[in-house]
Amino acid sequence: MARYFSIGEMSKLHMISVQALRYYDKIELFKPAYVDKESNYRYYTIEQFSVLDTIKYLKYLDIPLKEIRKHLTDSDDKILELLKRKVEFVENKIRHLELIKKVLTTKKETIQNSIYAENVGEITRKHIPNRSVLSIGYEPGLNYEDAMEFSRRKIANILEENISIFYGGVSGILSIKNITTNKKVTYENSFVVVERDLFNEKAKKKIIEIPDGDFICITYRGPYKDNYNSLKKIINYVEYKRIPVEDNVYEIPIIDPLSTGINKGLLTEIQIRVQKREIDLRCLV
C-alpha cells in the first residue's frame, strides 16, 4: 500500500511552503496524488518526490513556471535544449556582471587614488596607452550648456543600450587653436572611454581611437566652467618648452558628478598628446 504524505509533511520534507504547493496544484504544475473528498486535504506519494525536485531545480534556474510545466512532459532532447539555452543566458549574465564589477572597481580605484592627490595644478608628462572612445558631436543651434548635456545624454543612451549601465566619465575634446584665438573654452565634442567589443555595429561607427603616446597633463579641482586658467597654463607651458603637440585637448573627469555631489569635489585632468617625431633614416647612415 502506498504511503501518503500530507501537504504539511511534503512542505517540511522538501523545504517548500504550503502556499507554493497549493499554487502548483492550482496551475496544474504539481498536483497531489490523492485528495480526500470529505476534507479536501491533499496527499502526495514518494514517487512524486523526484518531480518536485525537478520543479525546484528548474525554478532555481529562473525558468518560468509555465515553461517548467511544459518541459515536465518533454523528451530528454528538449530538456537538454532548454538547459543549453539557460547555460548561454547565465554566461551572458556573468559577462554582464563582470563588466559591472570592472566598471565599479576602476571607478573605486580612481577615486581612491585621486582624493588625496598632491600634484593638482602641476604639469606632468606621462605615457597613456591606446584608448577606444565613443565620440558624439554637439547638436547645432544649442547653447554651450545645452549642447554638452544633450551630447552627454546621447552617450548615456548608447551605453545603456549596449552594456545596460551609464558609468559617467564623459569627457570633452577642445582645440588649442580655438582657445588661443577666441580666448574662451569651446568644446568640439564629447566622448567616453569604452571597450569596442562590447558594442553593436551601429554604435561601433561612433567609436574612434586615441593613439597611445606621451601626453602633457595637468589636473584641476572644481567645476568644469573654471577650467580656462588650467587650459591656458598647460598651453603656455608647451609653447614655452616648444613641445610639438597635437591640436586636440582632452579633458578627462577623474572624479565626476556621478562620484561626488559637490562641485569642489570634482577632479579633472587635461591631456595634450605630444606629436611623434619621424626619424630621418638618412641620419643613421
Image: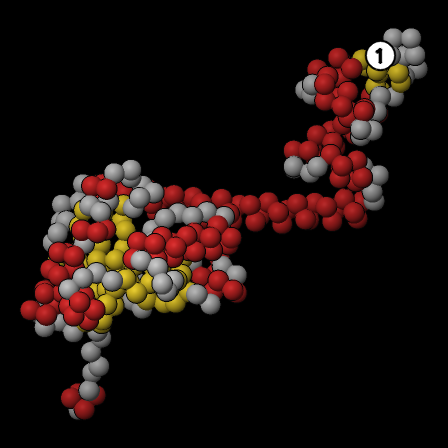
Q: Look at the numbered disc 1 and give the secondary structure of its residue.
A: loop
Q: In the shown orientation, is residue 183 left or right of residue 27?
A: left
Query: What residue do we see at 70% from left, 30% from top?
Result: 56
Residue 190: x and y in percent read 34, 59
The colour scheme used to paint the residues is secondary structure
Residue 242: x and y in percent read 9, 73
In-front residue for pair 277/260: 260
| Residue 54 in view in this figure | yes
Q: How many marks?
A: 1
Q: In the shown orientation, is residue 71 left or right of residue 188?
A: right
Q: In the shown orientation, is residue 165 left or right of residue 269?
A: right
Query: What residue do we see at 22% from left, 54% from top?
Result: 269
| Residue 128 in view in this figure | no
Say few, some or many: other residues with alpha carbon within 10 Å of mark 1 (under 14 / 14 to 19 / 20 or more): few
Query: What residue do we see at 51% from left, 53% from top?
Result: 161
| Residue 187 sits above or below residue 14 on the image | below
| Residue 28 sits above or below residue 185 on the image | above
**Quarter the N terminus occupies:** top right
Name which quarter of the figure residue 273 lies in.
bottom left
In-front residue for pair 27/78: 27
Q: Residue tagged by mark 1?
A: 41
Residue 80: x and y in percent read 74, 47
* In the image, farthest residue toward the left: 240
Residue type marked 1 = Tyr
**Quarter the C terminus occupies:** bottom left
* In the image, farthest residue toward the front: 141
Query: What residue do we see at 22% from left, 47% from top?
Result: 223
